[in-house]
Image (tube, helix red, strand yellow):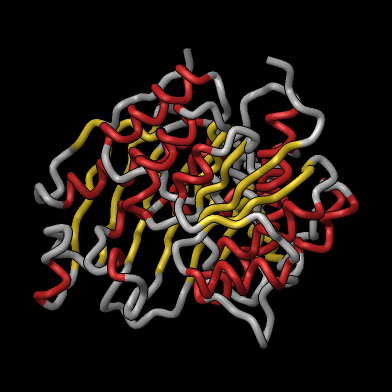
């Protein structure tokens, strides 16, 4: 089948998803945008705000629309796997917010649907398109770190008063913001995990998922020989304001970032010499905005554009606007389709990143027992 010169894309879920609507509308390779939300008032508000006339209340309308080339799912976590499989099986390219799924079987089902359809699947992981990550990736490419020796990631967030499906969610099921930067920079996958749950949750939060832990912390063995990573994730009962962070510990440099207003810290030491103490330097490099990687029409979206003092969304606000990542995600998804190639965060990569957290929670529920993480390999 001939690839269209411009795409028709549907955005499903207009809470946080409203952020992506104008980016698609302005992308030079997108011909038209359809929006979908089960909430009629929200559907009307977003459609009117951005001038989108094609609207649907049910995702099935999107799946059945013969002229829609691609679907971007920003729906609730329990719906991700089912909707992704449905979109792919209907012959549509599919982008999906994190996590990809919450069981290993669902990950396998999405990969199978992607391969059977031949369409693209992309997990829209913001953490690996932030300014801070893109800067760390450049440091890595420039050889600043030397040999990577250890990695650490964390994601702290209080989910009180969020939609009901969040209540009691196992923290590691939603760990990709902390896991993905580590695996991406190391260029590897996690192979085994020991994870421990910590803290106490009130009784009603146990009911939905049978999860007793507000906090989970894990040590991952990576496929790169001798390399490990540590990840901590919280969702309830921890009085730490929102923070995403990752740290790369290299033999020559260490880069630490917490998702706060402060810039990352870069620690550097001079090369090892016999009988000589290593010289140390500490700098606070401000990661540059990489709008230059994008088409001119969507460069403005690396800044806080859609959400502002008068129009906000909790995920966007708590996450600091996700640090310029959204237009990069849209551009990669769109161009991967038109260039007839896999996106960077394809189905296999997404499954490897997501499975790490799923297996970590399984370990926590078994007192920290080692759990082998399945490998999802490319064909």
Instruction: Determine which quarter of the picture holds residue 43.
Output: bottom right
Q: Is residue 198 left or right of residue 339?
A: left
Q: Is residue 223 left or right of residue 331?
A: left
Q: Residue at (22%, 44%) from the top-left corner?
A: 194
Q: Is residue 329 above or below residue 304?
A: above
Residue farthest to the top, as pictured: 379
Q: Inspect this view and state whether residue 25 appears.
A: yes
Residue 379 in picture, x, y percent from top left: 47, 12
Q: Residue at (77%, 62%) from the top-left corner?
A: 301
Q: Residue at (28%, 32%) from the top-left corner?
A: 373
Residue 318 in picture, x, y percent from top left: 52, 75
Q: Residue at (57%, 29%) from the top-left corner?
A: 120
Closer to the camera, 127 or 143? 127
- The quarter of the image holding the N terminus is top right
Residue 73 in picture, x, y percent from top left: 51, 49
Closer to the camera, 107 or 155? 107
Instruction: Determine which quarter of the picture holds residue 155.
Output: bottom left
Q: Inspect this view and state whether residue 286 appears.
A: no
Closer to the camera, 146 or 30? 30
Instruction: Determine which quarter of the picture holds residue 224.
Output: top left
Residue 115 in picture, x, y percent from top left: 47, 19
């Amino acid at each position: 089948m001939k690839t269209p010169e411009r795409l028709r894309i549907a955005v499903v879920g207009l809470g946080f998803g409203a952020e992506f609507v104008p980016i698609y509308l302005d992308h030079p390779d997108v011909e038209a945008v359809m929006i979908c939300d089960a909430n009629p008032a929200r559907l009307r508000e977003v459609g009117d705000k951005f001038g989108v006339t094609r609207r649907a209340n049910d995702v099935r309308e999107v799946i059945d629309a013969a002229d829609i080339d691609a679907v971007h799912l920003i729906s609730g976590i329990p719906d991700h796997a089912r909707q992704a499989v449905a979109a792919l099986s209907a012959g549509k390219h599919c982008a999906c917010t994190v996590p990809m799924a919450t069981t290993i079987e669902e990950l396998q089902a999405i990969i199978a649907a992607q391969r059977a359809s031949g369409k693209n699947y992309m997990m829209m992981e913001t953490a690996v398109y932030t300014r801070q990550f893109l800067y760390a990736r450049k440091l890595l490419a420039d050889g600043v770190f030397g040999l990577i020796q250890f990695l650490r990631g964390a994601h702290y967030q209080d989910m009180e008063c969020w939609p009901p499906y969040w209540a009691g969610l196992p923290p590691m099921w939603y760990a990709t913001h902390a896991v993905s930067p580590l695996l991406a920079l190391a260029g590897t996958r996690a192979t085994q995990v020991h994870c421990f749950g910590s803290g106490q949750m009130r009784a009603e939060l146990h009911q939905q998922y049978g999860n007793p832990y507000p906090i989970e912390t894990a040590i991952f063995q990576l496929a790169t020989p001798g390399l490990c990573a540590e990840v901590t994730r919280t969702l309830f009962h921890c009085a730490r304001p929102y923070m995403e962070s990752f740290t790369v510990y290299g033999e020559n440099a260490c880069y630490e970032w917490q998702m706060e207003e402060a810039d990352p810290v870069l620690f550097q030491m001079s090369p090892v010499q016999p009988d000589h103490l290593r010289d140390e330097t500490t700098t606070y490099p401000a990661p540059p905005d990489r709008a230059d990687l994008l088409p001119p029409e969507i460069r403005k979206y690396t800044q806080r554009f859609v959400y502002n003092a008068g129009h906000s969304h909790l995920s966007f606000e708590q996450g600091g606007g996700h640090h310029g990542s959204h237009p990069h995600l849209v551009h990669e998804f769109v161009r991967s389709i038109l260039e007839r190639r896999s996106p960077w965060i394809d189905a296999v990569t997404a499954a490897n990143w997501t499975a790490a957290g799923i297996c970590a929670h399984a370990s926590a529920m078994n007192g920290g027992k080692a759990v082998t993480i399945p490998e999802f390999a490319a064909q």
